[in-house]
Image: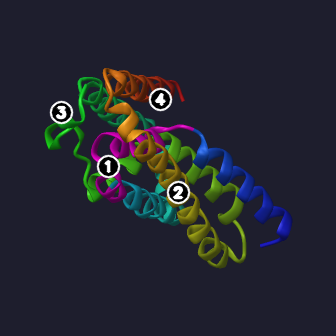
Amino acid sequence: MPLVEFTALLVLATAMSFTPGPNTTLSAALAANRGMPVAMRFVLSVPVGWCALLILCAAGLGAILMAVPALRWAIKILGVGYLVWLAFKLSRSAKLSEADASRMEIGFWQGAALQFVNIKAWMLALTIVAGWIIGREDSLQRLAVVVPVMAFFALSSNLLYASVGALLRHWLAIGSRLLWFNRMMALVLVVTAVWMLRA
């Protein structure tokens, strides 16, 4: 892959990975509410699910999605519904003791599966496949370069957001700070859901 193309990929990956979205918001919220060990399950699941999505898009799933509008809408509706449900659960946690498994449990496989209803993840995967992989003579070699790069960005961005959440954990335990933090994170999820619906 030429250096100019690789640089453009890095710029796109940075912009898309480090801006707030469902993954980074949940990473921060999980770490703030339940601590870094619990959040790490989700943080590690994001690159696994996202890379699986990227590989499937390169294998033709993206073309099927673009050809079947009903399938695109089904993914949107599932994604929006899941984010709104998570936002509702998150907005009700006012104390660290309340952020228990019944409110803030997102396991490894749930986190990986979330990528398949995350419109931001789909848009990035389709953009990368169309711009850097499909139609190139060296498409398999390009995919072999792109997948670890994107896994690194998915891991590092979610790890950063989770670290911020973990650093705020004790400060948030005072008074009603956690409740307002959780409501703010819930609002970010709802805004993301609305954006996903309009995308």
The CA distance from mark 4 to mark 1 is: 24 Å
Q: Amino acid at mark 1?
A: Gly
Tag 3 and tag 2, C-beta contact below 8 Å: no
The mark closer to the camera, 2 or 1, is 1
Q: Callout 3: helix, strand or loop? A: helix
**SS majority, magenta:** helix
Kind of residue sitting beneath label 3: Glu
The location of residue 181, given as percent across then percent down, is 40, 27
Q: Where on the picture, by quarter, is residue 132?
A: bottom right
Name the residue tied to disc 1: 35
Along the line of sight, the residue nearer the viewer: 63 or 99: 99
With 143 as the anchor, is 75 left or right in this view? left
For marks 3 and 2, the one nearer the N-term is 3
Give neighbour class at mark 3: few <14, some 14-19, many 20+ (Cα, 10 Å). Answer: some
Q: Report, in whole angstroms, how far the alpha carbon at label 3 lies from the one at label 2.
A: 29 Å
Q: Choose the circle earlier in sequence order: 2 or 1.
A: 1
Q: CA distance from mark 3 to mark 4?
A: 25 Å
Where does label 4 land, which residue? 192
Q: Where's the C terminus, which quadrant?
A: top right
Pointer 2: what residue?
154
Q: Nearer the viewer, residue 198 or 60?
A: 198
Query: x and y percent of residue 172 in the render?
Result: 37, 32
Dot 2 crowding, Cα within 10 Å, few <14, some 14–19, many 20+: many
Give the residue number, with chain letter if any, for mark 3.
98
* Magenta stretch bounds: 20-41
Q: Quadrant of the N terminus?
A: bottom right
Q: Nearer the viewer, mark 3 or mark 4?
A: 3
**In-image side of 176 versus 53 (left or right):** left
Which sits earlier in the primary sequence, circle 4 or circle 2?
2
Q: CA distance from mark 2 to mark 1?
A: 20 Å
